[in-house]
Image: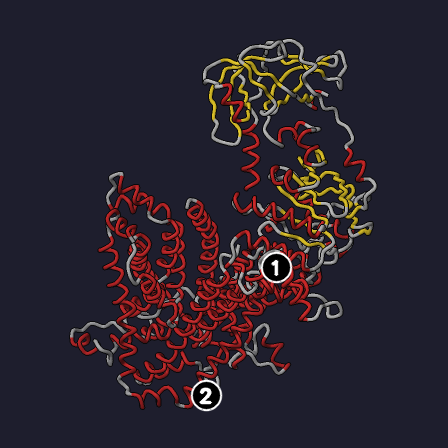
Amino acid sequence: MSKNFAKRQVLPGFGITMGYTVTYLSLIVLVPLAALFLKSAGLGVADFWKAVSSPRVVASYKLTFGASLVAATINAIFGFVVAWTLVRYKFPGKRIIDAMIDLPFALPTAVSGIALTAVYSSHGWFGQYLEPLGIKVAYTPIGITLALVFIGLPFVVRTLQPALADLERESEEAAASLGANRFQTFTRVILPTILPALLTGFALSLARAIGEYGSVVFISGNMPMRTEITSLLIISKLEQYDTAGAAAISVVMLIASFGLLLSINLLQHLAGRRYQGAL
Amino acid sequence: MNASTLPTTLESPESWQVAGPQLRTATEESTWVRWLLVGSTLTFLTLVLFVPLAAIFAEALRKGWAAYFASFNNPNFWSAVKLSFLATGISVPANLIFGVAASWAIAKFDFRGKSLLITLIDLPFAVSPVVSGLIYVLLFGMTGWLGPWLSSHNIQIIFAVPGIVLATIFVTFPFVARELIPLMQEQGSEEEQAAVSLGANGWQTFFRVTLPNVKWALLYGVILSTARAMGEFGAVSVVSGHIRGKTNTLPLHIEVLYNEYNFVAAFAVASLLTLLALVTLVLKTTLEWRIQRDLEEAAKSE
Amino acid sequence: MASLKTQHAALANRLPPQAPSFEGGALNNTLRIHPPQKSERQQEQDNNPMSIDVQHISKTFGSFRALNDVSLKINDGELVALLGPSGSGKTTLLRIIAGLEAPDPNPGASIRFYDEDVSRRTVGERQVGFVFQHYALFRHMTVFENVAFGLRVRHKSTRPSKEEIRDRVEKLLSLVQLAQFSKRYPSQLSGGQRQRVALARALAVEPKVLLLDEPFGALDAQVRKGLRAWLRRLHEEIHITSVLVTHDQEEALEVADRVVVMNNSKIEQEGTPDEVFHNAKTQFVMEFLGQVNVFHGRVQKGKATLGDLTVDYPNYSDDHERPATVYMRPHEFEIRRQSNGKPSFPARITRTHSAGAVARVFLETEDAASVLVELPLDEFSNLALQEGETVHLYPKNARVFIPSESK
């Protein structure tokens, strides 16, 4: 702590940068967020509960969380395969594909939404072949899930890539020299080592999916009780001048995503404490 | 000996055949497993990523180049362009200044509650786009806390340009700061202390010592914020009010066109934003290795 | 990285090679010359059962030739050290023996364990215990689980029962003196303890041979010494055929029954520690093992000359004069103030230091060549040498090599 004292003495600008940081943070983020909590608190317990538990709202939760869970699971599986392929193998076009993984980050969500709809609607490139098979993608929960897979993919791949690259090849060789086959090496050595990264990627993808709006609204069809996600429901409430109701549902969503992010941090902290430094 | 640098090739070299197929290296999968994994990757990415990407351009050009370019011959399009540039042009520099100030305070000084502050800076990432817009409606809207006061003074924020700028600032809030903070923490403050001991003042220290060390990360943060600011949809949608020619940004303009079944125009505008996204990806990839190098150098010199 | 450092140190030990001119007459009678001869050990070895036999192994990585037609036989129960600078191919050879790497395809190449061809077997099928340089412990498993791993992944038909596994792991952990740490994670152990877990894990599968890649490379000097002696005792207890890779000559000479010195993708020399140290067959081995003073002279008609100093060198009887390198170890000198008629050369003392097991005297010949001499401390104090005074150096032993490029 004596070091900290010396630092303050030597470098200038702590007061002004810190003051600016806290002021700007408060004005842009903290005060508006506080307004949200205050607004929904103004409802009182009974009305708050009514606002967040009406059948249409509950249906939107089920859809949003259900589709997000399925999408995050698909992303965890395929994201792992993609990350593994990109880290371990060489094949033509690999660098371009690697760069393209971030496309869902860079592409405006509205553009992603109309593009996916164009491909998977009943007249689209794939939709026209899927529809006769009885698979309707656009304007169903499948389409919503597809959009959520699209926007969540980079989270899993980008979290897993460094973890896979950091895997010591020696531990895999050690497992092989002890008689483990490749499958045993994978399930007993590789998977447990990258599990924290995989779970983190899953949770990040899930958190993003729960709040997603732009890429989903075009493909979802937005039918109350059936294909209406929670984000859209908040907008509907707002358009009906039910700001308190919108605020109440928003609070539920915020708590869900904060809880998720908190558990990610906790997970990483635990994983770090137990295994790290075992070089 | 760094075993991890040994190449793992998919092309099966002749030497394997001679020694027998079992003699692949201990950490390699059998050929069919590898082809299966590469095949799944390519199929999955094609279905989810590449085909939708191609569809944007195909739909935009469905009725030919003339129809494509006609889509841009529209005053509402140009006012959307202007508004998008305005919102980006205000929010990115604002967050840049904030990011630099915050990372200076956090990386160069020790104080209580530092990790709480970092968490709070990251907070906007955890807030869904619609909620990001909603909070400003609750604050500045007609029924909001400051609404009556604002309207009595004839100031309009919600359903007007200031609301759009505010929402854009909110969703791009952490980008610059979260690129700078880890890098500057890794680099420590020894170089700055040396500069100050040699007689440099605060500004000189920042511009001549700190900034050159973090310039790539700073640029990276700016590029990410710009892409997000140009493309934000949900948050802006809530505060905009969709007044044509006045409060529509480019993504909102796309929505309007799409909902009017004017698909060619919608995809034409979307193709512009897609090109912007592709440029972003190229810049981002180029910058990543530079930042990686900065980080490695910082780690080495410790 | 570590091996690079040592290589650098080895280079530093060599003194600047300059052509010195000494005074003094013939010293044929005092200097022993070492012509290459077949050692007893090697003769004996021809009759022993061979546990590892690799023949004509080459390995290229891209354009880099890591091994160039290497053949090596290792006796049953022997502890052999592969010694060499980094990049000499020693680790590659070890990994090829283990099956972690495949040799270049070559009709004559073979890898045999106990007369059985194993070249087509995977590392798992070869029944080797491999100890990795950085231990490669599974960090999400406890010490116990790490050691039990090799038994637990066995096919049901050969897998021991839970109780047997527990017994065997506990026995091994007490063998490596870690019984009380079985529930810890690798991150909670010291470097030396991790190394011992790695060893126990490798032994758990009852390997036919034990292969150790720089087993002490990542440890600090103190722990290294202790662990080295412990490994030697352990080897005497369990007598498993072991091959150890190291770049540390002290380690190789102290631990191994036999040392295989490698350089430039080839084996330079193999033999007992005594043989390779005292009877170096090549310039490389001479310079790599221990410290040497290097002088440049000439050979002709069975004699090597260094200035006025002459050394018998029967291996070269040609009339044609050729340059030669003469090596003298620092401890193989006698220092006198007066000339006693035996071959010697004068040198001025530039610095002395006696804070160690031996006293080190740094000298400079009239030709400004540096010489290092090591003396026992009592002899050093009897002589009462002063910095700046000129003394006579009497070499007790010299080795002559004709550089290969002039052949």
C127 relative to B269, above or below: above
For numbered disc 2, what is the local secondary structure? loop
Looking at the image, can residue A83 be seen? Answer: yes
Q: Residue at x 67, y 10 (%)?
A: C26
Where residue C367 appears, as percent x and y from the top left, is 54, 13
Q: Residue at x 36, y 52 (%)?
A: B184
Q: Amino acid at mark 1?
A: Ser
Q: Amino acid at mark 2?
A: Met
Q: Quickly name the residue at label 1.
A: C174
Quadrant for residue C330, please give it.
top right
Q: Quickly name the residue at label 2.
A: A225
Q: CA distance from mark 2 to mark 1?
A: 66 Å
Q: Is residue B10 left or right of residue B260?
A: right
Q: Which is nearer the eye, B177 or A259?
A: A259
Where residue B176 appears, as percent x and y from the top left, is 36, 58
C219 relative to C189, above or below: above
